[in-house]
């Protein structure tokens, strides 16, 4: 009887260790269910986005993922407006996009409207983009971008947010596309993915030089 009790206690101990290890695995190490080796990227334009701008982003994204399609333009859902109806909640838009996205697809919403989320203790923090990390959906906005270099900056925001969908966190390298904007627009200082971020994305199926 004592032997059985000892075995039982030992098994509980082993299960507890395994459970503890599984909780400590970070998203960036476990990867993503939708790597670009098998995924289709859907670009979801919202009302107000110029078709030529959407086509520009598609052409750029096709270089890293040939299976990039454009969906028909739709209105921004009024249910995603913030409390005083001045901005659209980026987190709510991610949930909205997620519901429209089948398994095996990644989706990026494009808008020219102001978007926000809750960050740094600020309930309505304006952002250029937001993405699940990891997940299926992300969004990018032109609202806070330079008026003279909008499309290049929008592409950088787009691949930054798509990088998050792969489980890639923010990067401390100032010239890396995965740099944290910290409430500003540093996209003109960003040159490429750093060595570590590039290696991670290539492993996930991205076509990068």
Image (cartoon, rainbow, N blue to C red):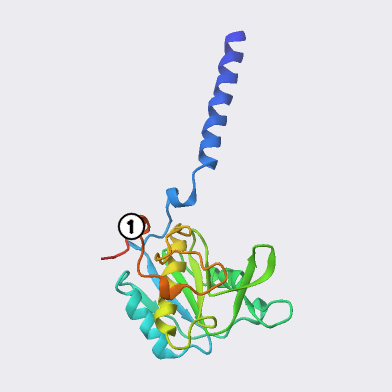
Say which residue appears at 44% left-offset and 88% top-offset: 148
Say which residue appears at 51% left-offset and 36% top-offset: 21
Structural crowding at the residue carrying mark 1, measured as other residues with C-alpha within 10 Å and reported as few (<14), some (14–19) or many (≥20): few
Q: Quadrant of residue 38?
A: bottom left
Q: In this view, does 85 lie above or below 1?
A: below
Q: Is 100 situated left or right of 121 in this image?
A: left
Q: Which one is in front, 197 or 19?
A: 197
Q: Quadrant of residue 42?
A: bottom left
The spot of residue 186 in percent (x, y) is 47, 72
The spot of residue 112 in percent (x, y) is 53, 85
Q: Identify the residue position indicated by label 1 in the image.
A: 195
Q: Which one is in front, 157 or 63?
A: 157
Q: Is residue 31 above or below residue 116?
A: above
Tell me the element at label 1: helix
Q: Can residue 1 be seen in this view?
A: no
Name the quarter where the N terminus is drawn. top right
> Which residue lies most toward the left here?
209
């Amino acid at each position: 009887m004592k032997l059985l009790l000892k075995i039982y206690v030992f098994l509980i101990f082993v299960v507890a260790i395994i459970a503890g290890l599984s909780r400590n695995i970070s998203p960036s190490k476990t990867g993503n269910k939708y790597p670009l080796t098998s995924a289709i990227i859907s670009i979801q334009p919202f009302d107000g986005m110029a078709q030529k701008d959407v086509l520009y982003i598609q052409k750029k994204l096709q270089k890293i993922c040939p299976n990039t399609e454009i969906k028909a333009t739709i209105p921004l859902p009024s249910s995603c407006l913030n409390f005083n109806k001045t901005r659209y909640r980026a987190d709510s838009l991610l949930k909205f996009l997620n519901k429209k996205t089948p398994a095996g697809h990644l989706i990026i919403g494009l808008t020219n409207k102001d978007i926000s989320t809750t960050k740094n203790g600020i309930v309505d923090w304006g952002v250029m983009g937001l993405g699940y990390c990891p997940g299926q959906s992300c969004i990018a906005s032109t609202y806070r971008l330079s008026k003279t270099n909008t499309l290049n900056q929008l592409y950088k925001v787009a691949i930054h947010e798509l990088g998050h969908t792969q489980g890639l966190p923010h990067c401390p390298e100032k010239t890396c596309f995965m740099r944290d904007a910290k409430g500003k627009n540093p996209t003109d200082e960003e040159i490429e993915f750093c060595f570590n971020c590039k290696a991670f994305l290539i492993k996930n199926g991205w076509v990068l030089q």
